[in-house]
Image: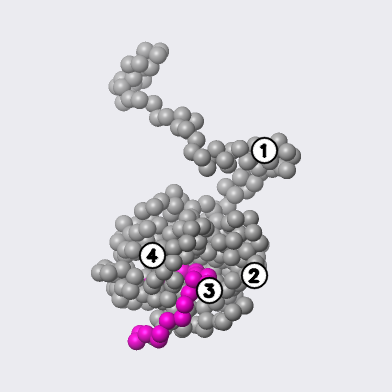
């Protein structure tokens, strides 16, 4: 079958291929930091500080954290005003009530209201509530997002499809030091009587970063 | 620790540019803001980064800045703000300003 693929793969050397291959990750030179990271990892394993299996397990556990954890927390806050109160006082303790280990770094929930929209950024690096919503998307770590979100937040939000009226104040939380932030979105209208699991499915990663609002 | 800054207090971020691991963003240095709250006390990251203890702990404040104060010709709403976590040794008290504390 041709499969809409109109060039020939007959030449076994690939020389006749009309497009160059995407370079493999290993084709680029390591930069100094990558080299240091690899070297330190190898030395620690060689010295028996931890085993390769421990490193793999840790990375697997980190990769397994998804925004679904944060969504459960948000849904509970919508469903239970007393929990919402405790969440706004101490996210890590409130998450622990749901059996979620949000880690030792204090996380603060910042609540959207009809007059205030919150959005998070880390202008210095890539601080993010990883233990609650997983690893940050690549754009969160980009220089463009980090510099523009504080300089022209409404323009950046509009590029995400989030256009806010002038009478809604935008507050940008720059995670500069020892705290992490989680946006508590507003509960969508028309969800009275909706169960907590169904509510949690409405909560997305971008809503908890604050670059989006939940459809209502 | 030294003095405590109360919520609503006007502060100015030091316009200093020392080398090292500093958690005070450039775009806020020299600007005035208002204390929102005390975030806690934490080991000094400028020391921790060099293998020292970071002790004594330093007070870390959440400081609110009005966007129009930060950026000439800011295109958003006048009520838009940036809030950042700034360590006490980067903050000087500033004279009360006409707008008082932000909402």
Whether B91 is among the magenta residues is yes
Which element carries disc 2, helix, strand or loop?
A: loop
Look at mark 4 in the image and give the residue it sits on: B27
Label 4 marks a residue whose chain is B
Label 2 marks a residue whose chain is B
Look at mark 1 in the image and give the residue it sits on: A43
- The numbered mark at residue A92 is none
Query: Comparing marks 1 and 3, which lies closer to the viewer?
Result: 3
Look at mark 3 in the image and give the residue it sits on: B88
Q: Is residue A162 left or right of residue B10?
A: left
Which element carries disc 3, helix, strand or loop?
A: helix
Pointers 4 and 2 in contact (C-beta within 8 Å): no
Rendered residue at 36%/75% (across/down): B66
x, y (%) of residue A153?
34, 64
The span shown in magenta is B81-99
- Residue A210, visible in the rendered structure: no
Task: Work out whether disc 1 and disc 4 sit on a shared chain.
Answer: no
* C-alpha gap between disc 3 and disc 2: 12 Å
* C-alpha gap between disc 4 and disc 2: 27 Å
């Amino acid at each position: 079958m041709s499969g809409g693929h109109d060039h020939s793969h007959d030449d076994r050397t690939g020389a006749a291929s009309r497009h160059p291959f995407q370079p493999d990750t290993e084709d680029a030179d390591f930069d100094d930091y990558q080299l240091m990271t690899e070297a330190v990892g190898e030395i620690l394993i060689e010295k028996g500080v931890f085993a390769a299996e421990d490193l793999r397990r840790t990375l697997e556990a980190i990769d397994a954290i998804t925004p679904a954890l944060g969504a459960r927390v948000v849904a509970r806050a919508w469903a239970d005003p007393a929990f919402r109160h405790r969440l706004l006082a101490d996210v890590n303790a409130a998450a622990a009530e749901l059996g979620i280990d949000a880690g030792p770094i204090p996380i603060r929930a910042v609540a959207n209201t009809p007059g205030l929209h919150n959005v998070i950024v880390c202008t210095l690096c890539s601080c993010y509530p990883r233990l609650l919503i997983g690893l940050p998307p690549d754009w969160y770590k980009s220089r463009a997002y980090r510099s523009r979100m504080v300089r022209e937040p409404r323009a950046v939000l509009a590029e995400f499809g989030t256009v806010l009226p002038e009478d809604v104040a935008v507050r940008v939380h720059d995670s500069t030091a020892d705290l992490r932030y989680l946006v508590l979105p507003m509960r969508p209208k028309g969800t009275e009587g909706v169960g907590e699991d169904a509510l949690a499915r409405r909560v997305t990663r971008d809503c908890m970063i604050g670059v989006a609002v939940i459809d209502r | 620790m030294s003095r405590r800054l109360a919520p609503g207090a006007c502060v100015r971020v030091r316009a200093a540019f020392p080398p090292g691991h500093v958690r005070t963003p450039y775009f806020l240095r020299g600007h005035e803001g208002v204390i929102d709250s005390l975030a806690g006390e934490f080991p000094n990251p400028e020391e921790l980064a060099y293998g020292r203890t970071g002790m004594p702990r330093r007070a870390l404040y959440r400081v609110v800045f009005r966007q129009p104060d930060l950026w000439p010709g800011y295109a958003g709403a006048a009520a838009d703000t940036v809030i950042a976590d700034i360590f006490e040794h980067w903050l000087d008290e500033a004279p009360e300003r006409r707008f008082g504390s932000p909402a």
